[in-house]
Amino acid sequence: MDPPEPLRTDGSNAFARLSMQVRVPRIAREVVARGGYPAAVRQDVEQLASDLEGDAPVPAPRPPAADVEGWRRAHAEHPGATWLGTEWFYAELAFYRELGRRCRFWETGRDPFDAAKEEELAGNRPWERLGVALATTGSREERILGLLDDALWGNRVDLSYAIAASRARADGDLLVDERAAALPRLSRPGADVHVVADNTGTELALDLALVAAVLEDPTARATLHVKLEPVFVSDAMPRDVWRVVDRMRERAGETRRLADALAGSFEQGRLHVAPDAFWSGPRFLRGAPAHLREALRAASMVVVKGDANYRRVVGDALWPPSAPFAAACEPLGAPIVCLRTMKSDPVLGLPEGLAERLDATEPGWRIDARRGLVQTYVP
């Protein structure tokens, strides 16, 4: 089955249009409203927000930044693109790249979203949720199964989408649960598990608990794939990983022991943190560079976290909802389990008729961050 065309910002998908015309300019203005930037940066960011609202052309990529040539190729593939008249995934990632450049991230190393990330880590939510997850008892396999669930619902804590973090779990929220299909590959001796991370803070803390459970097998290895630059407000970069571990170490009991276990695995060379420009770029996973495709195909299991990464897997397209999940994953050739709370329209692999029933009773079910999916594909 050929993938459908990606969603566009031209109004053909209401949420894509709302995101680029309303949500994204608001994010840009919130960055400079937190203070500390010189007037020239504030003016530059305000111009970016106004350009989005006014449907200006997507600017050509400029240094300093990572992967300028890759972005120039992507820009050439979207000739004449305007912010509100192009593919959503391309436009959204182009916005974050442009925001980082205008905030001079590559010149100063200052994360424009650092204040929001710090606020999340300073609160109680990450540590309360992590404490509950670490209190789970049972065999290692049972704990991994439970931690997959914790990691899934941790994805609601997304600092770019406040409504998601405020939700409490209810019966019927989990639309697809294929954890059992992923478990043997996560728990087997000598597993080589890759985690494509999403948000830092609460979600990353729960992801790291899952990673540590995998690494309880002394022959297992894990790689955490993270962003090279700031995107989607709270997405994790290497500095965020170690900040979370450091904050764990400041606490007592199981949380501190988790930090020590992660640090020990890193020192042993069994835990790797792998930033890559691809994860901040506009390509779908089927277009990943060779070094990433090879690494993911060789993995025992690839745990793909979050809504934007799900969009990267499925081509950010409106598939028939009951189309098999394998239809999107087969070209990748990698064993994948996606853990995602729904904050956008693309979805496939649902039971026949479920999407239609939800459309009739809850029109916003695809984007309101209430529902979750655990979907597994093994080649």
Image (spheres, helix red, strand yellow):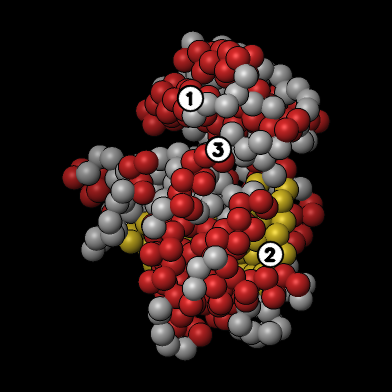
Q: Earlier in the sequence, mark 1 or mark 3?
A: 1
Above-or-below relation of 208 to 103: below
Location of residue 122 in the rendering, given as x and y in whole percent from the top left corner: 46, 52
Q: What is the residue that sits farthest to the bottom in this orientation?
A: 139
Q: Can residue 33 be seen in this view?
A: yes
Give the label on residue 223, or none. Answer: 2
The mark closer to the camera, 1 or 3, is 1
The mark closer to the camera, 2 or 3, is 3
Kindly identify which residue carries mark 1: 33
Neighbourhood count class around disc 2 (C-alpha, 10 Å): few under 14, some 14–19, many 20 upward? many
- Name the residue located 64 percent from the left edge and 58 percent from the top edge: 242
| Badge 1 vs badge 3, beta-carbon distance below 8 Å | no
Location of residue 43 in the rendering, given as x and y in whole percent from the top left corner: 58, 13
Q: Residue flagged by tag 1: what amino acid is it? A: Ala
Q: Which of marks 2 and 1 is nearer the N terminus?
A: 1
- Name the residue located 81 percent from the left edge and 30 percent from the top edge: 69
Whole-angstrom CA distance, mark 2 to mark 3, is 24 Å
In terms of secondary structure, where does tag 1 sit?
helix
In terms of secondary structure, where does tag 3 sit?
loop
Left or right of 14 on screen, residue 260: right
Kindly identify which residue carries mark 3: 113
Give the label on residue 105, or none. Answer: none
- Name the residue located 23 percent from the left edge and 49 percent from the top edge: 357
Left or right of 304 on screen, residue 293: right
Whole-angstrom CA distance, mark 2 to mark 1, is 36 Å
In terms of secondary structure, where does tag 2 sit?
strand
Neighbourhood count class around disc 1 (C-alpha, 10 Å): few under 14, some 14–19, many 20 upward? few
Q: Is residue 208 visible?
A: no
Whole-angstrom CA distance, mark 1 to mark 3, is 11 Å
Q: Residue flagged by tag 2: what amino acid is it? A: Thr
Neighbourhood count class around disc 3 (C-alpha, 10 Å): few under 14, some 14–19, many 20 upward? many
